[in-house]
Amino acid sequence: MVHARVMRPPVYSARLVSLQTDLIQKLPGVLKVVINGNFAAVIASQEYESIKALEKMKKLAKWESKPMTPLQDQLYADMVKNGSDGEIVEGDKNVNKAVSENAITLEAEYKRPYQMHGSIGPSCAVGLWKDDQLTIWSHTQGVYPLRSTVSNLVNIPLEKIRVIGMPGAGCYGHNGADDVGGDAALLALQMPGKPVRVQWMREDEHKWEPYGSAMVLKIKASLNAEGKVMSWQTDIWSDTHSSRPGGKAGHLIAGRHLEKPFAFEGGGYSGGSYRNALPLYAFETKNVALHNYKGPLRTSALRSLGAYGNIFALESFMDELAVKAGKDPVQFRLEHLKDDRAKEVIMTLVTKAGWNLKKEPGAGKGFAFAQYKNNASYFAVKAEVKLDRAAKTYRLMKLTGVIDSGQAINPDGIINQTSGGMIQAASWTMLEQVNYSANSVESQSWETYPIFRFEDVPDTEVFVIDRPELEPLGAGEAAQGPVSAAICNAIFDATGSRLREIPLTPEKIDWSKIS
């Protein structure tokens, strides 16, 4: 086996102007330097030799590039300004229904940044071109889609390509696993008869994986005199949440960097953008409008797709409406629900975790609920936070969840999956944001893209409602959205500050409001 490293451009649009390949070729262990347009790689006998050669390549390479726009501090405004005209994608389609003159109207805007998969181990693949047969060993989620995409990339018939699924670094949603498979295919053809192992570096994984799209969500609702929601309108600005490779080489990084590049054909603005945007609650009218937006960073499927941002906004706004109506936020939700299973999940949480409106100095509690995709698992969660006024920060102490996934075939698995989902969602909500400048993605390491450390992880408790008489429902992503809103609502309960932009960092809290 031989080892390869790929030199990525400094920024998406960069063009390789020059590289003194003869200086790289002379380095110890280097077997071949591959240059094909903006795709540049080195193959060496040993892994460390390939790393040393890669570092030398980076120093010697000259690139020409255009700055990324809009800049990060202008992103959300640009999304609203340059997104497409809103198209009603779900709801009653009745936007002209008159609102009572006695109604109270409330509006709010919520923001979710680009976020990454952040797989603990960088992506890896092995390619072998031997006896007119190309074999790829990969930890992809889809061996057949990757196979068809590699066929398009290297122009080899499907019957001469085999992709073998292997255990590897976490692959969920659409991260770098397919891209590195494409790298391995290209480089295996350069070394016939030799297995070529392509290992991404941490910097590659952080900078080049497809991110979860940034989102802007504006919600407007009206309350009648009794505190019932009469109308609800959500407007979403978002890039695509699905650009998985499905036979199109332009969906692989390498495909776009070749001398004869493959065009990227967007994955479309499927339901992933507005997943869970339509409230499950029984309102008189409710509509969701989608504004498609093409942003500066690469995006695709990140766990729960748009549901995470949509539920964050929806369930935060439900709390805001409850405050406006002067009602308990849990009771407020129950009054707007007709689904008995939804009600039971909420009431079970109240029984198991407790709920009252009594204020506790220096602490806060928050509640949120959703049925994932409005057709899968029901999930309710209580978040508990504790303030450190001296340090002007807060800590997430506990998350308690109740999930109804229909027939619970493996209750322990549901508990573990839900607990893990709660922890990941809390990390997204409190810490995570891809930062970028005009010339590069700046979140290139765990220092510049922090995630929860072990000491940050809250206590978690999950209760499963088993319904053996009903069909099982998908449980894998039910926790992502409600956890974000529950934390937001707990911060408001503790501090009086309503945070509407993820991540919910302590600096965004108005500490002067806290008595």
Image: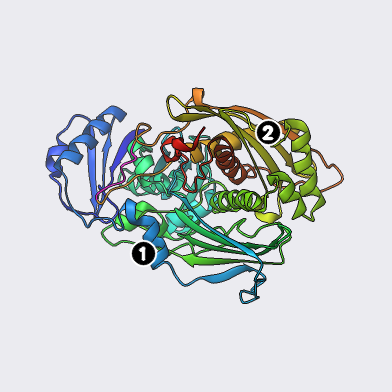
Q: Is the magenta stretch mostly helix, strand or loop?
A: loop
Camera-nearest residue between 61 and 479: 479
Q: Nearer the viewer, mark 2 or mark 1?
A: 2
Where's residue 150, x and y in %?
Answer: 43, 54
Q: In this view, does 319 lie above or below 283?
A: above
What coloring was used for the rendering? rainbow
Q: Mark 2 points at which residue?
A: 358
The kind of residue on which mark 2 rests is: Lys
Q: Which residue is drawn at 80% across and 44% down?
A: 344
Q: Which residue is nearer to you in this view: 366 or 349?
A: 366
Tell whether 71 sits left or right of 236: left
Q: Nearer the viewer, residue 144 or 295?
A: 295
Q: Mark 1 points at which residue?
A: 263
Which residue is depicted at the point 38% across and 40% down?
205
Q: Could you say whether the residue bearing mark 1 is in a helix, strand or loop?
A: loop
Amino acid identity at mark 1: Ala
- Find the magenta span and give its range: 439-444
On screen, residue 19 versus residue 195, left or right, reads left
Q: Where is residue 24 in the image (x, y as percent from the top left)?
A: 16, 38
Does residue 410 appear in this view?
no
Image point 40% across, 42% down: which residue? 128
Q: Quadrant of residue 75?
A: bottom left
**Magenta highlight on residue 17:** no
Crowd class of label 2 (few under 14; some 14 to 19; many from 20; radius 10 Å): few
Residue 328, percent from left and from top:
70, 45
